[in-house]
Image (cartoon, coloured by chain):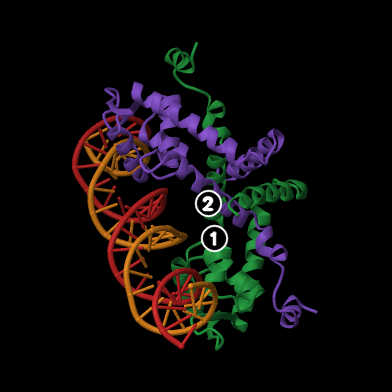
Chain colours: A purple, B green, C red, D orange
Amino acid sequence: MTRTQRKARADAMDVSEMALETLVGYNLKRAYVVLQNDYRAVMGDHGLSPRVFSALTFVVEMPNLTQSDLARRLGIERSGLVAIVDELEARGYLNRVAVPQDRRIQALAPTEAGVQAYEAALALINDHEDRMLHMLNAEEREQLVHLLKKIREIGE
Amino acid sequence: MTRTQRKARADAMDVSEMALETLVGYNLKRAYVVLQNDYRAVMGDHGLSPRVFSALTFVVEMPNLTQSDLARRLGIERSGLVAIVDELEARGYLNRVAVPQDRRIQALAPTEAGVQAYEAALALINDHEDRMLHMLNAEEREQLVHLLKKIREIGE
DNA sequence: CGATAATTGTTAACCTAGTAAACGATCTAA
DNA sequence: TTAGATCGTTTACTAGGTTAACAATTATCG
């Protein structure tokens, strides 16, 4: 009896038996949406979006990156990074600093306000993740991050 | 010595030590992008997008759902589902069937072509995931899905 | 019963987060 | 010195959503 024939007799299937539910990609997306909704609620309407926060992290932790460098590290196009750096500059969290040795590039230098905003946002985000992931113990959470990193590594 | 003071002396930080790298949300997003890029490469320009495939799954496995039902199960708004169902109907994979008992709703009935397209797409997607996730053994992959489901459950 | 409320599918306008292609300016290498 | 690569940027586009409003219909309850 094929799968299709079986369904023709017993109409509805148990959700948990659907192949969809066993797919990593589907579960990844759904889990990400859950986390992201809470992230936005926590950070508020004028808070840093996930992508802007991750850009700020690199600028603060590895000062004087170029935009091309940063785009590569974030896994996005240079063109897409422009708006992100624009926002961080408009907020006064970084400056585009001219580099005499190479006049094509502008190093991204964090401001003191940028460092403080980064540390404040990180505290909020850590609280948010601790609250959302309370059902995972330390080992499970570490394992989850470890498995996700393994998937990330495929994409170089 | 604070974190900020330490940085003032030693400029660049090891990427693996950044707090960002320990965040579940960030790793979730990056891992999803890696998987999704390969998904699109595998399915091709005219293939089913992830959201259309997941909608088709429900239509095939649980025939005669309403659009509101389906939207709830997919975790999206009713309005957002319209274009997805339009596409599936245009491809000839389902029909909107009038329900005499409630003239507001139209049951979503898969066609034979829809069932076949679902099964063909699922085979491609299973291959894609097997290939992308070859570095995870069966236990790790199961564990990953299990942890992601736990996160999904928070969002009801 | 009749009035009010809720639900369904849909459209319209909008938003976020990206991509791809082209550009002038600049740097690198043959 | 000339050809090619790289940098930051703009513009146009796409995917994948959201919110608010709407007419049609059904459900609820005094």
Q: Quadrant of residue B129?
A: bottom right
A19 horizontally vs A69: left or right: right
Quarter residue A149 falls in: top right
Callout 2, which amino acid?
Answer: Val
Asked if residue A148 is positioned above or below residue A22 in the image, the reply reads above
Q: Secondary structure at mark 2?
A: helix
Q: Chain of mark 1?
A: B
Tag 1: amino acid = Gly
Which of the labelled discs sits on residue A33, or is there none? 2
Q: Is residue A85 visible?
A: yes
Res. A75 in view: no
Q: As drawn, is B96 to the left or to the right of C3?
A: right
Q: Residue A79 placed where, x, y %?
A: 34, 45
Classify the position of the C terminus of chain B by image quarter: bottom right
Residue B65: x %, y % from top left: 59, 75
Instruction: Examine the image and state in which quarter residue C29 appears.
Output: top left
Disc assigned to residue B155: none
The residue at which mark 1 appears reads as: B75
Q: Looking at the picture, how far across and down is residue B52, in whole percent? A: 53, 68
Residue at 55% x, 50% y is A34
